Every structure is written in structure tokens, then in C-alpha cells.
Image: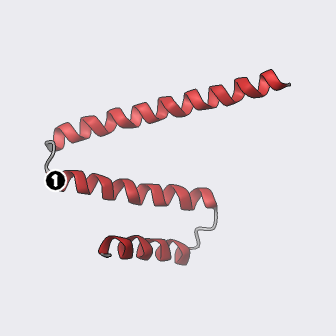
Amino acid sequence: MKNSKFIIDKFAKLIEQGIVSSKDLTSELLNILKSKRDEFVFKMKLTSKDEFEVLSKRVENLEDKLKKIDKKRKNSKSVKKS
């Protein structure tokens, strides 16, 4: 309940600040959720802080690579259909 209230409060603050664009809203929500995820993992003490930073960088790099691959796939599909 506390976590849902936190997210709702953050969402209300975003609306108050005038973030209208759906992309801005989406990216802001993702940032909030990622920070909560990072905080949770750090509190669980599953890894050391240094190890966590390295692993999170690796995950970010993999996400970027996946986005690039998806873009290439979408571009190649649109070319084939033409």
C-alpha cells in the first residue's frame, strides 16, 4: 500500500508540473520504477554496490542493443513490404 501511494504521489506531481507529452510521462514513470527497483535490490544486499553498478550498466547496454535490433527489424520489414 505504501509503495502504491508513493507511485500515485509521484504521478500526481508529474501532472502538476505540466508534463503533457505521453513520451515524457512514460519515461518519467520508467525512471521512477527503475529507481525503486534499484533501491529494492540494494536493500536486499544481493550484491555489493560496485557489483550492482557493473551489472546495471551491462543491463543498460543490453537494453540499448535490443532497441537497435528492434529498430533494424522494423525498418527491414517496412522496406520488404514496399
Task: Say what secondary structure mark 1 lies in.
Answer: helix
Colour treatment of the image: secondary structure
Query: Please, which residue is most extreme toward the right here?
Result: 82
- Please identify the quarter of the rendering in which residue 56 is found: top left
Residues packed near mark 1 inside 10 Å, few (<14), some (14 to 19) or many (20 plus): few
Relative to 6, is 28 on the left or the right?
Answer: right
Query: Residue at 44% across / 74% down in the picture?
Result: 8
Q: Is residue 23 above or below residue 1?
A: above
Q: Which residue is mark 1?
A: 44
Residue 4: horizontal and vertical position, in percent?
A: 38, 72
Count all numbered tags in the image, as a single digit: 1
Q: Is residue 50 above or below residue 33?
A: above
Relative to 36, is 10 on the left or the right?
Answer: right
Residue 68: horizontal and vertical position, in percent?
A: 56, 29
Query: Residue at 33% across / 56% down in the picture?
Result: 35
Query: Residue at 45% across / 35% down in the picture?
Result: 63
Q: Identify which residue, 24 or 33, lies in the foreground.
A: 33
- Please identify the quarter of the rendering in which residue 18 is found: bottom right
Query: Residue at 37% across / 76% down in the picture?
Result: 5
| Quadrant of the frame with the N terminus | bottom left
Residue 45: horizontal and vertical position, in percent?
A: 13, 49
Q: Identify which residue, 32 or 77, lies in the foreground.
A: 77
Q: Amino acid at mark 1?
A: Met
| Quadrant of the frame with the C terminus | top right
Relative to 61, is 42 on the left or the right?
Answer: left
